[in-house]
Image (cartoon, coloured by chain):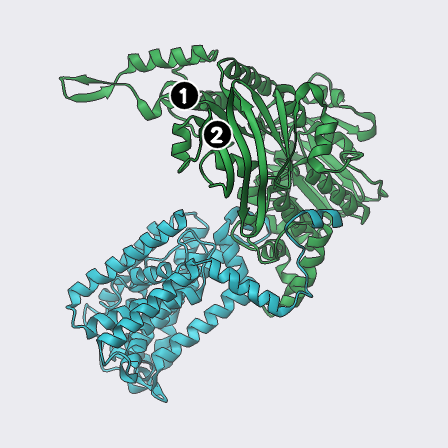
Chain colours: A green, B cyan
């Protein structure tokens, strides 16, 4: 029997058709991969299932009964659990309390004082963890767990409420490969219990690995629903973008010129190893390494976001002093942070104002912004970057993730930066937009700029750069030419197995 | 790219779009956001109600009075809007009104009118800088810092005057609070001037955009090269300057430096800003909204007077209106 049946669901927002006649079903104990570009309608359908949005048309049946949740609480009560990227755990409390936070077992002493019954809590927690095959001590505080374990506890907590369907939105975004496998093992256990799972992700390989069937959304429509055995990654990608992508990251060759930006003996803290590297005009340099290895932190220091102990930074042969981001920007160095929502965009402000922020001086006369100058600076960029927005005045929060990222990059193109630093530039961005971002960077260096980006996405690191610097535990483990390195080599260097 | 354009429901912005089409779209968007029309509608209803329930309401003398009465609040609320959009708030404004009025009165009795005015404004600038410095550089909470200056400034005002009213101010000074131009009182003209100036700064200058950016997302603003600390500092200085300016106008109007004026004025100013629809979270709002909030409170107070509601009950009424408005706002946001 179908656990969930979605038939002809449509949804419009202010004239934008977010979903159009979306239909698919989900069997009991099935893992369904849900993929599509940003803005394809994945979040909309999830939010409808979660009770956050109401559908305009169509029917949804849960175990054969019409399903029309009043609000998220109603949806949860009916057995649909959405696991968000942001964890809803209380870090200082032990696993056991987190698991049963909403119904902590109590006992009465002296007949009228209710107190927490520790023994029952431990017993219940152990039972739940065991039944899900989680090998963790319920007394461990949540903040001692790694990212995957936290995620698993978060899901266990939700499953505890008798979930029929678990929806996971980008659950592996911040996980290391080993942790991903841990999570997958757990998802398969859920499946064996008869829980259905909707697995939403941009990482096609992972979707291919874990799903039984895959639904592809594009422009608010279901393009295809296929059994995993009957398809392959290339076909899925083709369906997602609706056109064939010949190379994932088309890297144009640019003329490599003089040294543009140079870092000598950078140390994060006093006792750290020193880091030195340089980038030339026309060159794209990739920094990579496992989470916390220092690749991202290096950019955070060089952009003025975080303080560092010492080190010399040269731009076109002249030493620059970095105290504030403004110091670096003044020299023509732009920085795209990894946390788009909290550090990249100003959600309430318009697309135009977001792009203008670093270039206000350029469009200002006696303190007043010239509308004409502002428009002539921003409009060509929006066209060139293919940013999909109803207007220049639309608040950035109304754009999809990929388009928001393009807005953050557009800021620096508008500001005439010559060196661009990007921290995880395609994090949470779909395949099509990823390729577009790299095409953009290619164009940027072709025009004489230099790019340094930090990324943990290996295919991206190798195919979109000229040179790769691999970090291991806070220092440089290898400095490789992109053409002579492959994923295996980079992986070995980043896990300390090989040092160049 | 053309493919993408055809497929998607969005369109690329185009300068050539006919202006009338844009106008229609603009009006549509305005109507869609019922939020923007709610307070104006309530305000209109209040005006209509008062027009019919009091024959005196819609007379020039009364409207003039409303303008005069609200001018001090309006000037303070203008400064407050800057701070709130920048992501903070300022509890010290009411005390600054009293301190700068009193200090200016004392100074001008000894050293003449220009010195007096200068002293009043310098006090505002100094307190604003102090607030701004601690809040932006030391990262202290605006609540703590401005609560401190609220108490300190009030204490200073009472101390320097010995707790007494400083009267016998010269006519050249009191004229800013008592004079009029073609029947419009100077305080009203001043508040319109301050308001228009503030609106232009917020809306059309790079500085204004930076205030919105800092209030909207401090870290993103910093990473875009905005000197966040300077902007926050500037908003607090503007707020205190507005308050001290209001203090001068008020001293002129009551012809005395009075250390006990302006109690709760900052709270009314915050209420006016929020009532207008500017969010306390920062990063959004406008002075037009604030003006509406100020006028709403002003007309409401005036109406309660005309309807002979006792003063103490007026406070109750204003409180109830404010909380109701906030509740309705929250309900609409939750929709």
Name the residue carrying label 1.
A162
Q: Is residue A301 above or below residue B159?
A: above
Q: Give the spatial CA distance, label 2 vs label 1.
A: 18 Å
Give the image quarter of residue B39: bottom left
Observer-nearest of A247 and B172: A247
Question: Closer to the N terminus: mark 2 or mark 1?
Answer: 2
Quarter of the image for residue B36 reads: bottom left
Q: Chain of mark 1?
A: A
Q: Chain of mark 2?
A: A
Q: Position of residue B133 (x, y in %)?
A: 43, 55
**Can residue B243 be seen at all in this image of the molecule?**
no
* Pick the front one: B312 or B260: B312
Q: Which mark is residue A263?
A: none
Can the viewer see residue A245 in this picture?
Answer: yes
Residue placed most toward the observer, B335 or B180: B335
Mark 2 crowdedness (10 Å alpha carbons): few <14, some 14-19, many ≥20: some
Expressed as whole percent of the image width and height from the top left, the position of residue A268 reads 60, 34
Is B158 situated left or right of A257 in this image?
A: left
In the displayed structure image, the side of residue B282 where residue A477 appears, left or right: right
- State the SS at label 2: strand
Have a look at marks 2 and 1 and say if they share a chain. yes
The picture places residue A309, in percent across and down from the top left corner, at 59, 36
The residue that label 2 is drawn on is A61
Mark 1, residues whose alpha carbon is within 10 Å: few (<14), some, or many (≥20)? some
Q: Residue at x 70, y 45 (%)?
A: A420
**Number of labelled discs?**
2
Horizontal and vertical percent position of residue B305 = 20, 72
- A191, A4: nearer the viewer: A4
């Amino acid at each position: 029997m179908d656990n969930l049946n979605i038939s002809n669901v449509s949804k419009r927002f202010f004239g934008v058709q977010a979903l159009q006649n979306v239909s698919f079903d989900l069997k009991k104990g099935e893992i369904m991969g849900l993929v599509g570009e940003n803005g394809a309608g994945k979040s909309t359908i999830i939010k409808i299932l979660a009770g956050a949005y109401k559908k305009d048309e169509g029917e949804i049946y849960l175990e054969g009964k019409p399903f029309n949740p009043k609000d998220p609480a109603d949806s949860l009560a009916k057995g649909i659990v959405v696991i968000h990227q942001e964890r809803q755990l209380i870090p200082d409390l032990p696993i056991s309390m987190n698991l049963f936070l909403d119904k902590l077992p109590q006992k009465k002493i002296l007949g009228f004082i209710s107190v927490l019954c520790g023994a029952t809590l431990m017993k219940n927690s152990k039972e739940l963890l065991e039944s899900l095959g989680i090998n963790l001590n319920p007394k461990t505080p949540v903040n001692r767990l790694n990212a995957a374990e936290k995620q698993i506890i978060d899901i266990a907590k939700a499953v505890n409420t008798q979930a029929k369907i678990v929806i996971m939105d980008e659950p592996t975004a911040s996980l290391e490969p080993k942790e991903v496998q841990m999570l997958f093992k757990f998802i398969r256990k859920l499946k064996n219990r008869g829980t259905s799972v909707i697995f939403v992700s941009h990482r096609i390989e992972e979707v291919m690995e874990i799903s039984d069937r895959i639904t592809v959304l594009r422009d608010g429509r279901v393009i295809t629903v296929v059994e995993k055995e009957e398809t392959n990654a290339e076909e899925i990608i083709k369906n997602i973008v609706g056109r064939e992508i010949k190379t994932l990251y088309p890297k144009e060759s640019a003329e490599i010129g003089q040294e543009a930006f140079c870092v000598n003996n950078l140390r994060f803290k006093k006792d750290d190893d020193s880091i030195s590297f340089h980038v030339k005009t026309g060159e794209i340099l990739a920094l990579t390494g496992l989470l916390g290895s220092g690749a991202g932190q290096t950019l955070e220091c060089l952009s003025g976001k975080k303080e560092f102990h010492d080190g010399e930074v040269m731009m076109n042969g002249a030493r620059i002093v970095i105290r504030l981001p403004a110091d670096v920007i003044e020299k023509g160095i732009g920085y795209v942070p990894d946390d788009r929502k909290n550090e990249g965009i100003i959600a309430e402000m318009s697309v135009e104002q977001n792009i203008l922020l670093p270039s206000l001086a350029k469009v200002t006369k006696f303190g007043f912004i010239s509308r004409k100058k502002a428009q002539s600076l921003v409009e060509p960029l929006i066209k060139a970057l293919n940013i999909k927005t109803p207007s220049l005045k639309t608040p950035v929060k109304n754009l999809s993730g990929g388009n928001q990222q393009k807005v953050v990059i557009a800021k620096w193109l508008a500001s005439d930066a010559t060196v661009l630093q990007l921290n995880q530039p395609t994090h949470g961005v779909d395949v099509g937009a990823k390729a577009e971002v790299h095409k953009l960077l290619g164009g940027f260096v072709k025009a004489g700029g230099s790019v340094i980006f930090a990324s943990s996405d290996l295919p991206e690191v190798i195919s979109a750069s000229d040179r790769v610097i691999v970090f291991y535990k806070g220092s440089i483990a290898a400095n490789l030419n992109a053409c002579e390195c492959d994923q295996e080599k980079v992986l070995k260097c980043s896990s300390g197995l090989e040092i160049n | 790219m053309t493919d993408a354009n055809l497929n998607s429901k969005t369109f690329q912005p185009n300068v050539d779009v006919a202006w009338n089409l844009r106008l229609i779209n603009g009006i549509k968007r305005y109507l869609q956001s019922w939020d923007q029309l709610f307070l104006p509608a309530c305000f209109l209803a209040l005006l209509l109600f008062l027009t019919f329930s009091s024959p005196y309401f819609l007379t020039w003398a009364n409207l003039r009075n409303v303008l005069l009465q609200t001018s001090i609040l309006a000037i303070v609320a203008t400064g407050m809007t800057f701070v709130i959009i920048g992501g903070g708030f300022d509890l010290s404004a009411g005390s600054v009104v009293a301190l700068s009025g009193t200090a200016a009165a004392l100074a001008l009795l000894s050293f003449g009118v220009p010195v007096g005015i200068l002293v009043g404004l310098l006090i505002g600038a100094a307190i604003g800088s102090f607030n701004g410095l601690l809040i932006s550089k030391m990262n202290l909470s605006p609540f703590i810092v401005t609560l401190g200056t609220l108490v300190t400034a009030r204490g200073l005002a009472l101390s320097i005057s010995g707790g007494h009213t400083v009267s016998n101010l010269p006519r050249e000074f009191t004229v800013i609070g008592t004079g009029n131009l073609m029947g419009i009182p100077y305080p009203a003209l001043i508040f319109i001037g301050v308001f228009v100036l503030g609106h232009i700064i917020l809306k059309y200058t790079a500085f204004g955009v930076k205030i919105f950016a800092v209030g909207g997302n401090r870290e993103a603003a910093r990473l875009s090269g905005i000197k966040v600390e300077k902007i926050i500092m500037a908003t607090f200085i503007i707020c205190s300057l507005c308050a001290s300016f209001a203090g001068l106008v008020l001293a002129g109007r009551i012809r005395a430096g009075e250390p006990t004026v302006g109690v709760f004025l900052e709270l009314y100013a915050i209420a006016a800003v929020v009532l207008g629809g500017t969010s306390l979270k920062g990063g959004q709002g406008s002075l037009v909204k604030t003006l509406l909030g100020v006028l709403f409170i002003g007309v409401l107070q005036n109406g309660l007077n005309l309807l002979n509601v006792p003063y103490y009950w007026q406070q109750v009424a204003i409180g109830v209106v404010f909380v109701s408005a906030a509740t309705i706002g929250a309900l609409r946001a939750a929709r």
